[in-house]
Amino acid sequence: MKFKTTTLVSLLAASCFFVGGSALATTFKVAVGDAQGSAQWEMATKFKSAFEAKTAGKHKIDLFPNGQLGSEETTINSASMGTLDFSVVAVNNVTPFSPTVGVLTLPYVIQSAEEAKKLVTGDVGKELTANTVRDAGVRIVGWTFTGFRVLTNSKKPVKTLADLKGLKIRVPKNEIMIASYQAWGINPTPMAWSETFTALQQGVVDGQDNPYITVSSMKFNEVQKYITNIRYVFSLEPIIVGEGLFKKQPADVQKAILDAGAEATEHSYKWLAETEDKIKKELTAKGMQISDPADGEKEWISKATTTVWPQFYKSIGGKDKLDKVLKTLGR
């Protein structure tokens, strides 16, 4: 009788785990590297509401902004190992785990938000997602469009590469971005995102680069004075899910994740267009001075593309991969 009772309890538990094709109510954790008010937060908030609606409120999402669950690099590892569900991260932080994604951070490849969207929502994005599953054990399910990474610093206006010399610039721990600054004549300081504000505040570094929306949401105007409108990298920030977790979900939950990701991607694209100009004006009103690079950025572009691109053909899967991207963009 004891065996039968135990078996019956087990069967009842198993039968209760799935209801209408979906797992029992679950609350998923989503790490967000940036603060509330950022493009990452906006996209993650849309993903949360869309996913909860598509699962009729049965499954919930909790958001943890401002690096509460660890650095972006740490959360990628955690998602891969199954100790974290989702994370929103800068694509340059995915590149060390899945090098082919680096094609999106090669300097001056992406020249507009429209081009960024065309790449990540088309065949190139599908291929990079498959590679990231293979290489890193995480799946990209949506994209944040955050804008071009403009240069900020606390010392002086920067318009030329000569102006850049002598400044200590923080960059992510990303070989392509490090190589870009080296091509411009300085050795940048690789640093985790979670350490950046304090380093700027204490003068460990003089500057950094990030999109306007991030500069605003992280309150960098409190520790930075000058902005240079360089356009070397368009910041794309995917939301990833651990592949092991994704595969464990029933088909309807998987579909809800992917559909919510697609909705959040579209929302992020529109939100950037509606928000960036307003933020520029707000930062100017707060005392930041904005300059354009001299001579249409030609010197910056020439140094970066001729020096950096060839260094990374192998890591992105071959020069033909870059050629495919450029062809997709009509160049």
Image: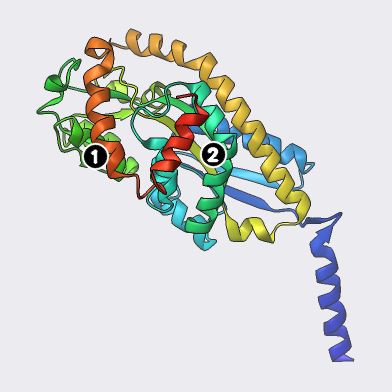
Q: Position of residue 188 (x, y in %)?
A: 19, 37
Q: Is residue 231 left or right of residue 242?
A: left
Quick one: label 1, few (<14), some, or many (20+) residues within 10 Å? many
Q: Disc 2 or disc 1, which is closer to the eye?
A: 2
* Circle 1: element type: helix
Residue at label 2?
Answer: 124
Q: Position of residue 176 (x, y in %)?
A: 30, 41
Quick one: label 2, few (<14), some, or many (20+) residues within 10 Å? some
Can residue 39 be spotted in the picture?
Answer: no
Whether residue 104 is situated above or below residue 331 in the rendered picture:
below
Q: Nearer the viewer, residue 258 or 309?
A: 309
Residue at the image position 56 percent from the left and 32 percent from the top: 43
Residue at the image position 59 percent from the left and 39 percent from the top: 123
Tell me how many marks there are: 2
Q: Is residue 33 left or right of residue 296?
A: right
Q: Position of residue 125 (x, y in %)?
A: 55, 39
Q: How is the image coloured?
A: rainbow
* Residue 111: quarter of image: top left
Residue at label 1?
Answer: 179
Can residue 117 be spotted in the picture?
Answer: yes
* Residue 217: quarter of image: top left
Q: Position of residue 34 (x, y in %)?
A: 43, 35
Q: Which of the labelled discs sits on residue 250, or is there none?
A: none
Q: Nearer the viewer, residue 209 or 58?
A: 209
Tag 2–tag 1 contact (CB < 8 Å): no
Name the amino acid type tagged 1: Ala
Whether residue 110 is situated above or below residue 298 in the rendered picture:
below
Indicate the quadrant containing the C terminus: top left, top right, bottom left or bottom right.
top left
Q: Nearer the viewer, residue 228 or 306?
A: 306
